[in-house]
Amino acid sequence: MKKTALILALAASGMMTSVNAQAAEPFKVQDLVKLNKLHSATLANSGDKVVYAVKNIDSNGDASSDLYIQSVNGGDAKKLTSVAGTEHSVAFAADDKSIYFLAARDGSSQLYQLALDGGEAQKVSNLPLDVEGFKLSQDGSQVVMNMRVFPDCKDIKCSVERFDELENQTTTGREYKQLMVRHWDTWSDHSRSHLFVAKLNGELITDAIDVTQGLDTETPPLPFSGMEEVTFTPDGKHVVYSAKAPGKDQSWITNYDLWQVPVTGGEAVNLTEDNKAWDSHPTYSGDGRYLAYLAMSKPGFEADRQRIMLRDTVTGQEKEVAPLWDRSPHSLTFSKDNRTLYVTAQDVGQVSIFEVNTQFGDVKPLFNDGSNSIVGVSQDKIIYSHKSLVEPGDLYTMSLDGQAQQRLTEINKDKLAKIKFGEFEQFSFKGWNNEEVYGYWIKPTDYKAGKQYPIAFLVHGGPQGSFGNSFSSRWNPQLWAGAGYGVVMIDFHGSTGYGQAFTDSISKDWGGKPLEDLQKGLAAVTKQQKWLDGDRACALGGSYGGYMMNWIQGNWSDGFSCLVNHAGLFDMRSMYYVTEELWFPEYEFGGTYEDNKELYEKFNPVNYVENWKTPMLVIHGEKDFRVPYGQGLAAFTYMQRNGIPSELLIYPDENHWILNPDNLEQWYANVLGWLDRWTKKD
């Protein structure tokens, strides 16, 4: 069983003395929203230096973002920029003498180049549309950029005119002829993200070739993918990208393929046509011999195991690497010798770094504590970003064998010195079918031996997700610990990082195994940890976690003193017809609502409302198109009409998440106030 104590985490971060200082206070949401954030880190081609951006937030909440450069061997960082605004999406030039980045210094997001030996950043592109992402060719002579255009337009000028027409039109009606009409939090305006290629020859880029001309789907895929889905071939003659084929089935298929198109434009070739499931993350070895990518095998399923595929670009032969490895990697980085892949994957409550031998398929864990992402790999080092339940995120290095770990940055050193976190530990118990299930507990910041504390029982969303050893800017469990609660998080059946069979087990059983795991997990942890008061517990969840709050209301109505339901599903029938990604319910419930009405209704919370009685706070965003706000409003309406203590918090400007810092403070004030009301009363 994995175990992580606060003292070990702080000793590793060099902050134990600060946190033990008398001035340290419990973690509050006001601290969370003012933490600095590290982003856009990139490693030089030589492997000896790294550039990263830091969003600094002062005591008044005002933010500024700048770029820094630092040796991978440690030492002081040098500030590279100080211009108002945010530089992001950084890349080194091929010779490492300059960097490229995106910034909106003139009001439009464009590409800039900054020489590392001094001087001001020079504007590289001056296009009439925003550049949303970019990637350089291996030799640095070309750039591929993504911009939003209208697929039927023949040039950029046409798209600019169309956007101007939309801005100035006097009517407000939106017209559609097929799904999907909206996605995540945005109604479609019929534009699409396309890829444009231009030369980097010292001249200002004012035009570029749309190599995806006419494509009526998004590339990179929105809303969460980026330029990791796009790459040049090593010879610079083609661009490879991930996208769906055009068609009227966009809302109910997950068949993303890898496409190859000449940099001069023309017909794209489907490289993965045989696989009808999701293909992504095209990554070439440095010598150009191999193309690695990730591939799922189940059409329509977004949480299938990601297989590592390797294609020999000379012979055309393709194979799955490490087919017996029961984990799902979500990043790929080749070693300098082109024979090894370094990947990250969820693994028993962590996001770990692994070494994968491409020839024999051997998988070696290198670092398995906390949540990690690889920035780059040099001849002798891995540079990675590390987070944990007590660390917001910094850069580290380690040797290629996982040893000699060294911290590079401490972007929140002074702020964390004033904060006291709760001690945490991973635990396990026997859940559904007597199978091993894992979770975490966190002690209240003001923990005193011999005293019992109320419980904040956090239920993750997904449902194929995990509340693991990481640091969240939204649902941060240390905030409940700072408010005097013992925190419990269970990775029930369906969670990720425990093998694909464990993840698959929730499909078609939303209210079965997970509920049993949550019930057994709460019973086990309160028996193991006597300081947890099971009679004063409140359950909280968002998305599927919100669904589980509604499900608990009808199927475990005596389990908690209160509930908090954020963006929870209430009526599975109406939910099916108003959500945007239809592939999700169709896979999870075995087809359309008409195909498998019996299963939809079996696990439909609205069918059990006669059992509802637990006080519930309902929260929803009006821009949530994944779980539209009518689901939350319906749950609140039922409770109000039937005399069940309930409150509603609605955000007209938020989507499935709460992103505005002021709104987040209001969110926690309401949530913690609700918990205090029902668990801390005399």
Image (cartoon, helix red, strand yellow):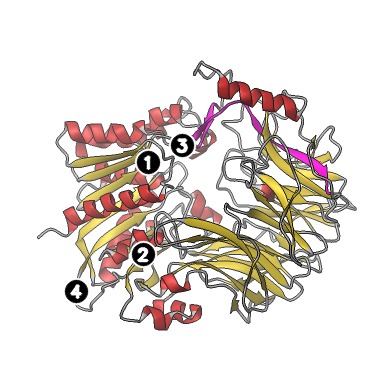
Please name the residue that numbered disc 1 is placed on.
567
Mark 1 vs mark 2: give the one in front: 2
Q: How far apart are marks 3 and 4 (CA)?
A: 42 Å
Query: In the rendered image, which quarter is residue 361 located in?
Result: bottom right
Lower position in the chain sequence, tag 1 or tag 2: 2
**Which numbered mark, 2 or 4, is in the foreground of this view?**
2
Does the rendering let one see residue 173? yes
Q: Which amino acid does label 3 sit on?
A: Arg
Which comes sooner in the sequence, label 3 or label 2? 2
Q: Residues within 10 Å of mark 3 (few under 14, many from 20)?
A: many
Q: Locate residue 476 relative to residue 681 in the image: left or right.
A: right
Foreground pick, 168 / 387: 168
Callout 4: 10 Å neighbours few (<14), some, many (20+)? few
Q: Say which element carries label 3.
A: loop
Relative to 538, say whether 183 is above or below. above
User: Which amino acid, by three-letter code, is at mark 4?
Assistant: Lys
* Vertical comparison of 439 with 666: above or below: below
Secondary structure of the residue carrying tag 1 is: loop
Q: Which mark is residue 478?
A: 2
Which residue extends farthest front? 119
Badge 2 amino acid: Gln
Which residue bears the numbered disc 4? 451
Prevailing secondary structure of the magenta residues = strand
- Residue 184 is a magenta residue: yes
